[in-house]
Amino acid sequence: MLAQNYDADKHDPTGWYLSEKLDGVRAYWDGTAFWTRNGNVFNPPEFFVKNFPSTPMDGELWTG
């Protein structure tokens, strides 16, 4: 999904965690692996994901 303008009449953010767009890479965590929007796999080091939940998450990887 690409970013779109927020419209309070169309979008209800209740129950979502939101953050500003930084200058990172979009990533999707499916509970076991990281994926790009195009379906490529990220290979993070084990220490980075060892405490990640089994719940899917969608967000941005940023190192800065």
Image (spheres, helix red, strand yellow):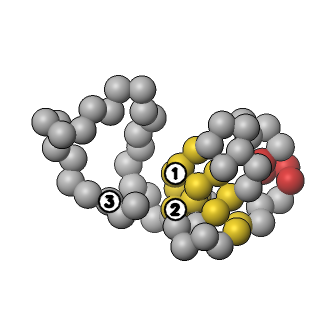
Question: On the rendered structure, is 37 left or right of 5?
Answer: right
Q: Under tag 2, what secondary structure?
A: strand
Check the image and name the residue furthest to the top. Answer: 14
**In which quarter of the view is residue 64 placed?**
bottom right
Q: How much space separates mark 2 and mark 3, taking CA atoms?
A: 11 Å
Residue type at numbered disc 2:
Arg
Q: Is residue 62 visible?
A: no
Callout 2 touching callout 1 (CB < 8 Å): yes
Within 10 Å of the Cα at label 1, are there few (<14), some (14-19), or many (20+) other Cα atoms? some
Disc 1 residue type (three-letter) = Gly
Q: Residue at x 77, y 66 (%)?
A: 43
Mark 2 or mark 1: name the one nearer the start of the chain: 2
Tell me the residue that label 1 is attached to.
59
Residue at x 59%, y 55% (from the top left corner): 28
Q: Is residue 58 above or below residue 11?
A: below
**SS at mark 1?**
strand
How far apart in space, not on screen, are marks 3 and 1 (Cα)? 12 Å
Q: Is residue 1 above or below residue 59?
A: below
Q: Let me know if residue 49 appears in the view.
A: yes
Earlier-in-chain disc, 2 versus 3: 3
Residue marked by disc 3 = 3
Label 2, residues with CA under 10 Å away: few <14, some 14-19, many ≥20: some
> Disc 2 marks which residue?
26
Residue at 54% x, 73% y is: 38
Quadrant in the picture for residue 9: top left
> In the image, what residue occupies the spot 52% across and 62% down?
26
Tell me which amino acid carries mark 3.
Answer: Ala
